[in-house]
Image: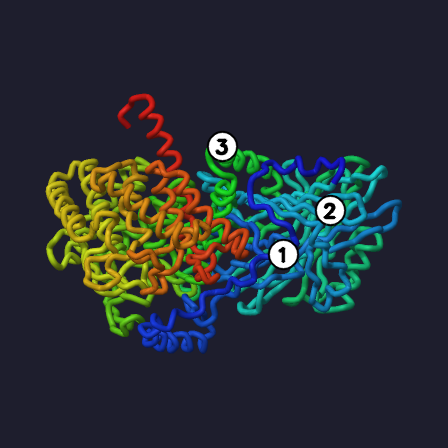
Amino acid sequence: MSGSNLDKLVSTKHGWHVGFDKQFDPKWKPFGRPRAKQLVEYVPLFMRYLRIWYKLKKAKRRAHMDFINPIPLQQIYGAPIGGLGCGTIGRGFRGEFCRYQLVPGLYEFQTVETNTFTVCIRRRNTTSYCQVLIPNRLKKKGLRAWNAAFPAENGRYQALYPQSWTTYDLPAQNIRLLCKQLSPVIPHNYEDSSLPVASFLWNIENLNDEPVEVSLMFTWQAGSASHEFVCRDISHESIKVSDDGISAVGVSIKQVLRDMNLEYCIMGKQESDNIITTRTNFHVDSETDGRDVWLDLVEDGRLTELKTARATTLQSASCVCITTTVEPKSIKASEFVLAWHMPEIKFGLGQKIYSKWYTRLFDKATLTGSTLCIYTMKNRIKWEDAIAKWQQPILDDTSTPDWYKSALFNETYFIADGGTIWLDVSDDHTLPEHIRKWGRFGYLEGHEYRMVNTYDVHFYASFALIQLWPELELSIQYDFSSTITYEKLESRIYLFHGQASHWKTLHSVPHDLGDPDEEPWLLINAYISHDTADWKDLGLKYILQVYRDYVYTKNKQFLTDIWKTIKFVTDRVKKQDVDGDGLVDNGGFADQTYDAWTVLGASAYCGGLHIAALRACVEMARILNDENALNEYEPWLELAKKSYSEKLWNGKYYDYDSSTSRHHDSIMSDQLAGFWYLRLSGLKYEDFEKERVDSVLNTVFNANVMAFGAGKLGAVNGMTSSGRLEIVSMQSEEIWTGVTYGLSSTMIMENLRTQAFVTSEGIYNTCYNVAGLAFQTPEALTRESRFRSVGYMRALCIWSIQKALELSRLENNSKSNGVDD
């Protein structure tokens, strides 16, 4: 708009930009079923699964992996709000409040249309414009009188997580609005990053030649997003608080949600020249109530409290309105804060009550939603500066493309909005000291795959935590180390083969730390598709992550504490080498993270991980001066390398496995996973020859990236040696988002930067600009416009690209300076 200065208040040009009128490709759908030729092996599994699914449904509980009702695609999401482990609320890029995760680890994907912002414009004591600031029509009975359906062509959105900016050009008003949304997700900050708060700073620009009075109203409804969880004891209360020179007015909505106390608090910041009014309670299913609120606002741009209190129900809501006068050709701010305060939680089985991590930052006895709101108003500017300090060096790097900068920060959303749980367990003296000091931390494999800290996937995703909140990564590692010597001999049926086996085997690394709808950390291994004690990658990934985490943190006490469990794990790994060639042998089923892709004998994926893990063991033994371990691991490593080369190298790449199947020589995009971990841990070509690494990367780029999708979809998991899509398994023909990011980081380390960004740009562009999967990046995409498992952990692996950029820059500088790095 001519003469406008509002856009200058957006602190960066970077991020995901989208208009309210954006239309995504409608062809994209959740994955339905495998090909007919693949389906045969899944029929027995599905029948066993169906019995469990119906049993849970009868008990009014969700399956931890629901293949019957995959989450429908909603092409609506923008940056969510909320810190780490405190519960999150999604935002649509058009302004909706959607995808609520208030009950720990359990998502409600409904949009609450009551929760919204409204603007009212008055000139010369007359209302000229009143509009709900979302482009959708409101369906609730009590909201039908409200003027909704903001013109979509007049709204623009920009997200660079954890901030977003929404711009509204008000039709025929010569007024522009800019809403800046922020939650304090700040790396290396272990306090404010855990807060259940969001700041909404509205800047109002008046381009007219006369002053205008502008009112902004924030409305919030009791309950959560659906009726799945029992909500009772609802109350609404208007509040006014002051602290350290800051005053605020608003409303507190208290309730008990699934037997946990929850308080919503919406507050406006009081300034010397604004007026804040409230409507403490109205019913959104009452035409009379809804019309009364609307007419009250339209009448004078303010709200009036009713003299008679309304009854409170799940359909009751509250409003807070800030009214201010904006002078001609000027900009003025109004600030709202939302807090959702659930200090104590329990999981589905209710065996234990926990305090959330953020509560330890305050006096728990007096902590309320208004405390959190005032704290947010006090610290918002400090948080903005901290976020800028973190992001600006990366945004200023002219050697990387703009889309990458958007992808890197926006994919970080999952650390907070991954069903994340951060608990204060400082009083539990049975736990390692590190966990008591830094808290117990967990996040889900995915919004649809409800398992805490799924370890084979965390292997990829953990590059985000170890760089941004390393103490939380170590906390997870300490938790897993405690499980190594734990066994649970109770038997259960595993779905793929229908055979009974132990719940948790001694010295095995568990698949996950439990289901939040059961009792995570107390009931581990929620995954029941396979007995993962027989998986060949989990122990190897544990070794590699421990080594990498030591390299990044230099925390020798951590390595010392964990070392004994490394020995237990390697003893178990040794038993998985059935032919004595030094390599683990896959068992003829899908016994690794590709849990629907059968593999037999020595394999490119697990064999490479095994070699890398043995190298990590050698390096850790040297650090700890453990000569006995070194004498064990060094010859084992040499034997494994010899067997890997003889059994799998075909002159261009490593065969998928050493079997005699016609698919044994498939080109797997993830075959260098072990080498990747070593390279990002500072090692080079001690165990993987440079010439072979280059050959593999060029082969994968040409086949799995360019021949498959012309670089527009990322890297497909499998291609045949003849250059066709490998369709032996549903997973072989999928593109895994996180694996593609990991492959790209490997390419960067080997000075294939152009190929790396071509490879990974396809993932970002497809998810954010084509399929409408922003802020819900799935595990998998297919060429047929299908996706599987939205909101998935593995995409956090994009932070391995950033690590590769930093390490490769150091290596190149060392070479140019003639220094041996």
Please identify the residue farthest to the front as the structure is shown: 722
> For residue 451, which quarter of the picture?
bottom left
Q: Quadrant of residue 167?
A: top right
Residue visible at 58% across and 58% down? 98
Out of 708 and 19, give the one closest to the viewer: 708
User: For residue 753, which quarter of the picture?
Assistant: top left
The three-letter code of the residue at mark 1 reads Glu
In this figure, which residue is indicated by the disc labeled 2?
169
Q: Residue at x 51, y 32 (%)?
A: 396
Location of the C terminus (image quadrant): top left
The secondary element bearing badge 1 is classed as: loop
CA distance separating discs 1 and 3: 34 Å
Q: Circles 3 and 2: CB distance less than 8 Å?
A: no
State the residue position of label 3.
398
Whether tag 2 and tag 1 are in contact, CB under 8 A, the answer is no
State which tag comes first along the sequence, 1 or 3.
Answer: 1
Dot 3 lies on which element?
A: loop
- Compared with 595, 820 (above or below) is above
Percent coordinates x, y for residue 186 in the rendering:
49, 40
Q: Quadrant of the N terminus?
A: top right
For residue 258, side relative to residue 723 (left or right):
right
Question: Residue at label 1?
Answer: 96
Towards the viewer: 635 or 492: 635
Please, what is the three-letter code of the amino acid marked with disc 3? Answer: Thr
Q: Position of residue 286 (x, y in %)?
A: 73, 69
| Residues at discs 1 and 3 in contact (Cβ within 8 Å) | no
Number of other residues with Cα within 10 Å of mark 2, as a class: few under 14, some 14 to 19, many 20 or more:
some
Residue 587: x, y in percent? 21, 63
How far apart in space, not on screen, are marks 3 and 2 (Cα)?
Answer: 32 Å
Rounded to the nearest angstrom, the CA distance separating label 2 from label 1 is 18 Å
Of callouts 3 and 2, the N-terminal one: 2
